[in-house]
Image (cartoon, coloured by chain):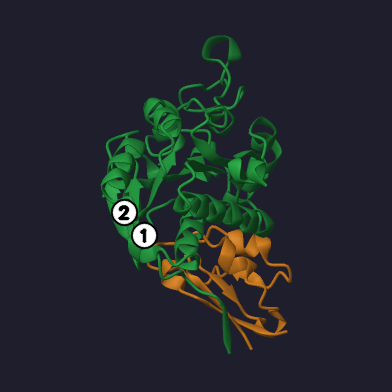
Chain colours: A orange, B green
């Protein structure tokens, strides 16, 4: 089962709750990027490891995550 | 590609003002998703409180009304009496519901008002800067209890769900939390049931949601989740305290 996750990074507050609940531990806060709010936004590089569980999206207080199943 | 999860259409596109990691946003989503699931979004009227959730009227994509501090159940009562076919809910924090508005919520429950209250309990006054609330745990440090809440001087936290469950007019009272995806799923079921019972006209319904306040607890968002699980749940047990639909069966 593969998934695709998109983040509205300009709205991310870098709280890390998505990082905390990701069962495959592929989400991280990208410290090379600072968004307009001044936070390091959540991101995924190894998208092929995503299992489309949507834990991250359900946990995101700001509803910035969309999860699709491929 | 199938969408597994996206932002609920019952939430507006406004950016929420909550602090990073505050679980108010998760609770907003659950209420919004419930309104869509039950297909009542178009006939819903929410009442926003005073406190951190004061701007809730900007976030829900249904008719919203702002109430004076603690008076959301009284305003919701008025709305429900004039428009009895609408789904009416209040969204209140512990400063609003358990402190200044205790009389309003108790009497709304006593009258058996057919409204749903979402009670967000984070054991602290969030918006005003982390002062001690009636729900603050014994020993919990706040800006007005820097050595921790003393039982001798300030008593012990008030448990609103248990208190309201003793009232005959209450149809459904449950306490949940949103610290893990499993708890979130359970909280959503509770909120959904409360709204269903309201629409069946059985009486007053309330779901108390234990929520984090990383900013005023002085923790990271993830530390706040574990503090809630380890310290707050023993003081505020998660349970269904009243469900009149079960007795009928």
The chain letter under disc 1 is B
Tell me residue A20's x, y (percent).
66, 60
Tell me residue B172's x, y (percent).
55, 42
Residue B57 - label: 2
- Marks 2,1: beta carbons within 8 A: yes
The quadrant in which residue B40 appears is: bottom left
Give the Cα distance between marks 2 and 1. 6 Å
Horizontal side, residue B178 vs residue B51: left or right:
right
Q: Nearer the viewer, residue B35 or B177?
A: B35
SS for callout 2: helix
Residue A42 against residue B232 in the figure, above or below? below
Residue at image location 53% in from the left, 40% down from the top: B171
Q: Nearer the viewer, residue A62 or B95?
A: B95
Tell me residue A31's x, y (percent).
55, 68
Residue at image location 49% in from the left, 45% down from the top: B202
Say if labels 2 and 1 share a chain: yes
Tell me residue A7's x, y (percent).
50, 74
Dividing the image into 4 quarters, which one contains the C terminus of chain A?
A: bottom right
Q: Residues within 10 Å of mark 2 (few under 14, many from 20)?
A: many
Task: Say if residue B27 shows up in the picture.
Answer: yes
Horizontal side, residue B113 vs residue B145: left or right:
left
The chain letter under disc 2 is B
Q: Nearer the viewer, residue B213 or B93?
A: B93
Residue B60 - label: 1
Task: Say if residue B130 shows up in the picture.
Answer: no
Q: Residues within 10 Å of mark 1 (few under 14, many from 20)?
A: many
């Amino acid at each position: 089962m593969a998934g695709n996750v998109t983040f509205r990074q300009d709205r991310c507050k870098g709280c890390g709750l998505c990082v905390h609940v990701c069962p495959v531990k592929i989400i991280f806060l990208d410290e090379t990027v600072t968004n307009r709010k001044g936070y390091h936004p959540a991101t995924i590089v190894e998208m092929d490891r995503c299992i489309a569980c949507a834990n991250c999206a359900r946990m995101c207080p700001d509803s910035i995550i969309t999860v699709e199943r491929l | 590609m199938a969408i597994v999860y996206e932002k609920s259409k019952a939430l507006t596109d406004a950016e929420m003002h909550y602090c990073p990691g505050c679980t108010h946003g998760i609770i907003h989503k659950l209420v919004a998703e419930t309104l869509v699931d039950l297909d009542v979004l178009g006939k819903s009227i929410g009442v926003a409180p005073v406190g951190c959730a004061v701007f809730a009227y900007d976030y829900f994509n249904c008719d919203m009304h702002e109430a004076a501090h603690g008076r959301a159940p009284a305003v919701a009562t008025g709305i429900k009496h004039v428009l009895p076919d609408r789904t009416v809910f209040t969204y209140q924090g512990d400063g609003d519901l358990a402190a200044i508005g205790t009389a309003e919520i108790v009497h709304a429950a006593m009258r058996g008002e057919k409204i749903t209250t979402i009670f967000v309990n984070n054991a602290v006054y969030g918006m005003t800067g982390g002062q001690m609330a009636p729900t603050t745990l014994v020993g919990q440090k706040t800006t007005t209890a820097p050595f921790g809440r003393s039982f001798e001087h300030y008593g012990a936290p008030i448990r609103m769900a248990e208190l309201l469950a003793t009232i005959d007019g209450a149809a459904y009272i449950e306490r949940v939390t949103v610290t893990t995806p499993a708890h979130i799923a359970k909280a959503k079921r509770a909120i959904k049931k409360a709204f269903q019972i309201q629409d069946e006209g059985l009486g007053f319904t309330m779901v108390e949601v234990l929520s984090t306040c990383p900013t005023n607890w002085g923790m990271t968002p993830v530390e706040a989740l574990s503090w809630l699980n380890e310290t707050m749940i023993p003081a505020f047990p998660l349970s269904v305290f009243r469900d009149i639909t079960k007795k009928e069966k």
